[in-house]
Amino acid sequence: MKFFADTAEIDAIAELNELGILDGVTTNPSLILKSGRDIVEVTREIAALVDGPVSAEVVAMQAPAMIEEGRKLAAIADNIAIKLPLTWDGLKACKALSGEGHMINVTLCFSANQALLAAKAGAAFISPFIGRLDDIDLDGTDLIADIRLIYDNYGFDTEILAASIRSVNHVTECARLGADVMTAPPEVIHKLAQHPLTDKGLETFLKDWEKTGQKII
Ligand code: E4P
């Protein structure tokens, strides 16, 4: 499973990248706002830092303008994935830009049929938003299972990028269901390493080690 960081905060990205576990980054207009940075500048910095795909989102609503914005974002670096919303115009732009060889991440996916359309339009990634489905009392992970089944039925190579991940349980469930990628806020990725029994066990080991009076180095 590939791990993407869902943030535009350079320091947090650099820390995850240093551990060698980061396969890419996703941003969106809200994350750019939160960073307080200029979209082109911050995207360029992130793309230089991380080897994998860095998603940058268009904000136009009509296909011709989306295509123009997409080309501008793609020109920032070779590893940019143009993020397009799952609307009819977004699909038109996806077909055109993927045809030009650009990597496309179709975002704001909330149904299996939307995911089917994105795959047919040539998306490299489809981003089902599982947390936002949970927010309206639906089971977001059911959508991951449905898309996995449908893509496997027809051999679509669009990667399922589980997005809007809010908890470590979301990560486990998406991994169980075979999502290709998950994108999560850095805090959630850090929490994956935590377990109270690890902390408790370590405390006991360290106390007992002190009693031995030994040193390793
Ligand atoms: C994914 O690409 C999106 O940026 C993100 O996962 C949305 O998450 P949210 O629903 O927590 O805003």
Image (cartoon, helix red, strand yellow):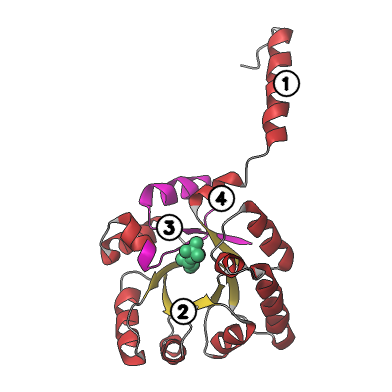
**Which amino acid type is shown beneath numbered disc 3?**
Thr
Q: Residue furthest front?
A: 137
**Magenta highlight on residue 95:** no
Mark 1 highlights which residue? 204
- If you read the primary sequence from the N terminus, does the residue marked by circle 1 or circle 2 appear first? 2
Position of 135 with respect to 206 (left or right) is left
Observer-side mark, 3 or 2, equals 3
Mark 2 highlights which residue? 104
Label 4's element? helix
**Which amino acid type is shown beneath numbered disc 2?**
Ile
Is the CB of the residue bearing disc 1 within 8 angstroms of ligand 1? no
Boundaries of the magenta span: 1-30
- How many marks can you see? 4
Instruction: Check residue 7 in the rendering and tell me which mark sits there, or answer none.
Output: 3
Measure the alpha-carbon separation of dots 3 and 2.
18 Å
Mark 4 highlights which residue? 189
Observer-side mark, 4 or 2, equals 4
Measure the alpha-carbon separation of dots 1 and 3.
37 Å
**Which amino acid type is shown beneath numbered disc 1?**
Thr
| Residue 141 percent across, percent down from the top left | 67, 68
Position of 187 with respect to 168 (left or right) is left
Q: Is residue 93 above or below residue 11?
A: below
Question: Quadrant of the image for the C terminus?
Answer: top right
| Mark 4 surroundings within 10 Å by alpha-carbon count, few (fewer than 14), some (14 through 19), many (20 or more) | many
Based on the displayed image, in which of its 4 quarters is residue 174 positioned? bottom right
